[in-house]
Image (spheres, helix red, strand yellow):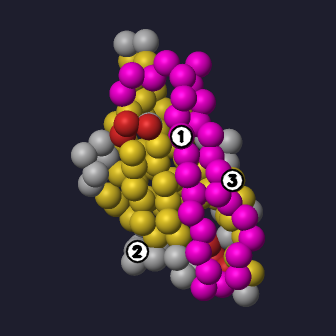
Amino acid sequence: QVQLVESGGGLVQAGGSLRLSCAASGSISRINAMKWYRQAPGNQRELVASITYTGSTVYADSVKGRFTISRDNARNAVSLQMNSLKPEDTAVYYCNVQGYRGGSWDTYWGQGTQVSVSS
């Protein structure tokens, strides 16, 4: 069983900051890509940022220069530092990892954490 536990969401004013964290636990022997997605009401889930095992990163254009993704391979953890938050960043944020377990690669999702930005 693999679990992704997220934390760090909340309510913040525009211009503020939040830091999301996600830790993977269970019988997972290797994690490749780690990603953050978000989904606002009425919208499709979209990729916010991703990071490879070696630290290469990709960001959505809408968050470039404001968000930073990082990971701790020893702890199977990924974080998303969100600065200069805007009301349009309001969404449920989901952690997503590609993990190796039981002889195969699979994709795992966290339960989601709400981020709300007030104007």
Give the amino acid at mark 2: Lys
Closer to the camera in the image, 85 or 48 = 85
Q: Which residues are magenta?
A: 1-30
Task: Check if mark 2's residue and mark 1's residue have beta carbons within 8 Å.
Answer: no
Disc 2, disc 3: CB below 8 Å? no
Badge 3 is on which residue? 113
Q: Where, by quadrant of the figure, is residue 104 drawn?
A: top left
Amino acid found under the numbered disc labelled 1: Ala
- Front residue of this view, candidates 76 and 65: 76
Residue 60 image offset from top left, x and y in percent: 43, 67
Instruction: Provide residue 21's location: percent of width, then percent of height.
Output: 56, 52
The relative height of residue 5 versus residue 58 in the rendered view (above or below) is above
Q: Is residue 94 visible?
A: yes
Mark 2 and mark 3: span between their CA atoms? Answer: 21 Å
Q: Callout 3: helix, strand or loop?
A: strand
Q: CA distance from mark 2 to mark 1?
A: 23 Å
Q: Residues within 10 Å of mark 1 (few under 14, many from 20)?
A: some
Residue 114 at x, y percent in the picture: 72, 59
Q: Residue at x 34, y 60 (%)?
A: 58
Kindly tell me whether residue 40 is visible in this rendering. no
Residue that mark 1 sits on: 23
Residue at which label 2 appears = 64
Instruction: Please tell me the numbered disc located at residue 38.
Output: none
Place of residue 30 in the rendered image (x, y in percent of width and height, measured from the top left): 36, 27
- Amino acid type indicated by mark 3: Thr
Q: Which quadrant of the figure contains the N terminus?
A: top right
Q: Helix, strand, or loop for circle 2? A: loop
Q: Quadrant of the C terminus?
A: bottom right
Give the class, few, some or many, for how many residues have Cα within 10 Å of label 2's Cα (few <14, many ≥20): few
Q: Marks 1 and 3: in contact by CB < 8 Å?
A: no
**Is 78 in the magenta?**
no
- In the image, residue 48 sits, relative to residue 12, either above or below, namely above
